[in-house]
Amino acid sequence: MDNNIEEKLEQRGIKPTAMRILVYDVLHRQKKAVSLVEIENQMKHVDRSTVFRTLKTFQDHLLIHSVDDGSGAVKYALCDDDCTCTIDDQHIHFLCTVCGQTYCLKDLPIPHLDLPEGFTFESANFVVKGICAECKR
Ligand SMILES: [Zn+2]
Ligand SMILES: [Zn+2]
């Protein structure tokens, strides 16, 4: 296991407990955003509510972000080291309608929105649907 997981957690002000290190390790190995159930399935003998609480802690400390891709399950992915989860750091997500996987398109920031006067921006959930490169082959 990667030694620098502890460092990554500490950088975000999270105390590196054994459970947190395990959950981070699972997230770290994903190429896509994953749901609570998918994370749980990749770990042995864990309690779902413990994993959920860990994800909540990670999210509160901006270590991960969540995506509601409309599939019914919220998915989670690690943030970049310098991510502050503000509008400028958020990116478009891509849901493949064939494999059901959700990708972080980190190079595609969400478009700037000119909201009508009097409206205040809080967050955006930008999901594009289509067929991913792997399924297209
Ligand atoms: Zn696909
Ligand atoms: Zn993402």
Image (cartoon, helix red, strand yellow):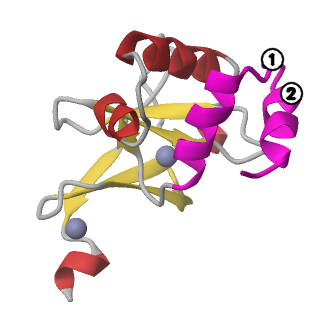
Left or right of residue 8, residue 53 in this image = left
- Compared across the picture, whether 84 is left or right of 134 comes to right
Label 1 crowding class (10 Å Cα cut-off): few <14, some 14-19, many 20+?
few
- Taking the spot 45% from the left edge, 31% from the top edge, the residue there is 66
Q: In the image, is 81 to the left or to the right of 60?
A: right
Q: Is residue 12 magenta?
A: yes
Look at label 1 and name its amino acid. Lys
In space, the residues marked 1 and 2 are separated at their CA atoms by 6 Å
Q: Position of residue 127 (x, y in %)?
A: 31, 46
Q: Does any atom of ligand 2 lie closer than 8 Å to the CB of label 1?
A: no
| Helix, strand or loop: magenta stretch | helix
Q: Is residue 41 above or below residue 116?
A: below
Farthest front residue?
45
Q: Which residue is mark 1?
A: 15
Residue underneath mark 2: 10
Total marks shown come to 2
- Residue drawn 19% across and 35% down? 70
Horizontal and vertical percent position of residue 5:
77, 41
Task: Compare residues 50 and 13 and report the one nearer the observer.
Answer: 50
Reading the chain from its start, which is encountered first: label 1 or label 2? 2
Image quadrant in which you'd find residue 96:
bottom left
> Residue 37, how many percent across, how many down?
29, 31
Mark 1–mark 2 CB contact (< 8 Å)? yes
Q: Does residue 121 show up?
A: no
**Residue drawn where x is 11% and y is 64% of the image:** 98
Q: Is residue 52 above or below residue 23?
A: above
Residue found farthest to the left: 98
Q: Which residues are magenta?
A: 1-29
